[in-house]
Image: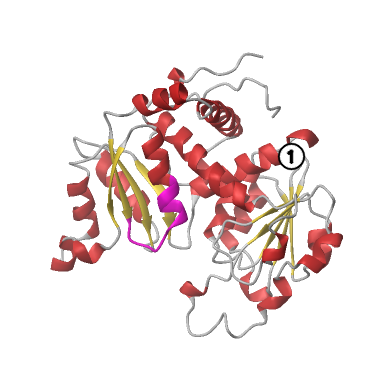
Amino acid sequence: MDAFTIAEPPETPLRHVLTSSQFDRRFLNYLCQLTNTIRRFDKSREGLAYLGSLLSHKRAMLYFTQPSTRTFLSFHSACHILGITASEIRDSATSSERKGESVEDSLRTFSSYVDLIIMRSPIPGLCDRTAQLLDATPRPVPIINAGSGPDEHPTQALLDIYTLTRSLRMRGGIDGKTICMVGDLRRGRTVRSLARLLANYEGVRIIFSSPPAFRIAQDLRTDLAAAGVAFEETDAFLPAIAEADAVYMTRIQDEYDVGDESGALDYSKYHLRAEHLPSLRDDCVIMHPLPRRDELDPEIDHDPRAKYWRQERNGMWVRAAVLTMLFGVDDRIQLPEL
């Protein structure tokens, strides 16, 4: 999508943000355009004051019972930009769950106090179950999945798409590009969500580079095949990144280890180091959802192809755009004229 093209808003209002599979190309184009517009308001005191007035009557709860710093602060900042009052729970041990209350009952109680629940949990499927539960109540507040076990991280994928769109805009956008995803692809929820979003673009090819033990799960393989996405899996690293228009690095997800499965393999073969930069295309985009370990050399940080610090700031604006859509005030943000 051209940076100056006016995108049509989605036909169906946004109710929850649970999975990247719920989004189509029209939604993604509109979200990218809306995010660009919101960022323009950041250029003046008056613009920021206007953004801060849009949702000053709303309250949100950040229910983050899985460790997080970047995603938490990104959402908290997005709420602040729009005037939303945000409260938080960072440890379920401080709630009645410690007394034996189910997490579902706790969340239903919390929904009585706020207009939105943003959730990050190690429990797979909890966001979906909570959304279904609240939809059946007299006060069905929206749910945003901010990371659900090893399942999905849809808003990370949205900001990744936005970063790719901006980074590749002078080359025709994401359509027709080769994206190489590297690392622990079986347990990396950002990879699962982003790969599904890439299915909305024409002629995209995905190369999954990983140790054999950490290849993508069968459900993702099935979904991509059904969507007609060209993809391949390899345990090679250098040949894979050399073909890519964008390289998406990820860390080892050893918090999900059963035994010492991560320690049993040599992950250094999938580290991107400064010495590898000549192997990349001159206009390749280097991304990482962070946090990083040794898989991404800090010496790469100042390479113009490195976009991962920009990803983080992009996330705040993308999440602000999502919030305006959830509460139906996105039409109060004037889009630029052609």
Quadrant including the C terminus: top right
The residue at the point 70 percent across, 53 percent down is: 306
State the extent of the magenta-drawn residues as a range: 64-74
Residue, x 59% and y 67% (percent of image)?
251
User: Horizontally, is 106 left or right of 257 in the view?
Assistant: left
Q: Which residue is drawn at the image coordinates 37% and 38% (left, top)?
A: 80
What residue lies at 50% left-to-right and 48% top-to-bottom?
154
In this view, 321 is above or below 331:
below
Give the number of callouts. Answer: 1
Q: Quadrant of residue 13?
A: top left
Looking at this view, name the residue that lies furthest to the top: 337
Closest to the observer, 114 or 215 = 114
Q: How is the image coloured?
A: secondary structure
Horizontal side, residue 144 vs residue 252: left or right: left
Is residue 69 covered in magenta? yes
Which secondary structure, mark 1?
A: loop
Label 1 is placed on what type of residue? Leu
